[in-house]
Image (cartoon, rainbow, N blue to C red):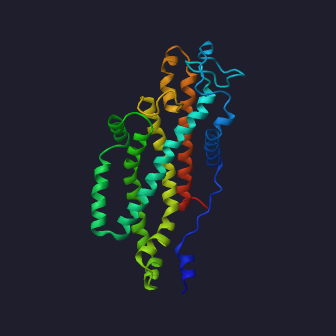
Amino acid sequence: MTTSTFTRTGLRPFRLPAGNALFLTSIVMVGIMVAAAAAASIIAPYDPDFVDLGNVLSDPTAAHWLGTDAAGRDTLSRMMFGARTSLLGPLLVVGLSTLLGIALGLLAGWFGGWIDSVLGRVFDLLFAFPALLLAILAVALFGKGLTAPVIAMIIAYTPYVARFVRSLVISERARPYVAAYRVQGFSGGWIAVRRVLPNVMPTVGAQSTLNFGYVLADLAALSFLGLGVQPPTADWGSMINDSRGALLSGQALPALVPAIAVVLVVIAVNVIGEELSDRIGGRLPS
């Protein structure tokens, strides 16, 4: 049997699912949010930090589609610019924690033995600290902003990804195609990186999509508490915090708009992640 034959049998093809209406709607919604964040400098109608004290807490008008906040700043413009920090933070956390988790999980799952034992104890130690608590501790040590919470959450989410990858690699290691490659004389490292890792990547990617929603909610909560992105930088969580006074005066829109955005994105990425997980797991047709 040739190497090309092993390649065809060892790798399971993955196709982008056609999806149902909710799945496609979620993709479109996330795409719009990302596009608005990327093009905010071009399409935003106002400077997000421009203060107009003569137009405080304005209702939606032709000039301000989503009204203004307590400082007279255009809510729509701040939503567009706030999407940058609100989406960038989770993207960094998920991207880096996934890379680290894949490396550690592959190492533990493939080699086992003392490597698996040591990494397992480290993961257990990190599991004792919830991600949000670890982020708050990082802010207390290194100061407010986006950097400290992002680093803390990368550390907190890496063990979850690593433990998940480890279980997948252990299952994959027992498959016949791995033994066939060994018989042909391929090294363990080559098999792990070139054959086993591509097989587990779609499942890991689906799980990472779910993690994005969790991280987004955590970072928004930190900003709401005043520990994340600091004013006057626009961020959805800090926008909700800034609008608490407006809520007391009966003006709910400045807080409601960013809150709805957070909820919609979290729901959308969870729908996408669940759909991908179901299709990869064979519970839905590809």
On the rendered image, what quadrant is the N terminus found in? Answer: bottom right
Residue 224 is left or right of residue 138, and the answer is right
Q: Is residue 76 above or below residue 160?
A: above
**Residue drawn at (34%, 43%), measured in percent from left and top?**
130
Residue 282 horizontal/vertical position (percent): 54, 62
- Looking at the rendering, which quadrant does residue 65 occupy? top right
State the image quarter where residue 225 is shown: top left
Q: Quadrant of the C terminus?
A: bottom right
- Could you say where residue 12 lies in the image, as x and y percent from the top left? 55, 70
Check the image and name the residue furthest to the bottom.
1
- Up/down of 161 relative to 146, above or below: below
Q: Is residue 282 above or below residue 142?
A: below
- Side (left or right) of 61 relative to 243: right
Camera-nearest residue between 52 and 91: 52
Closest to the observer: 147 or 16?
A: 147
Would residue 32 be found to the left or right of residue 149 on screen? right
Determine the image quadrant of residue 72: top right
User: What residue lies at 46% left-to-right and 81% top-to-bottom?
Assistant: 181
How far across and down, in percent of the image, does residue 156 sit?
37, 47
- Viewer-side residue, 119 vs 249: 119
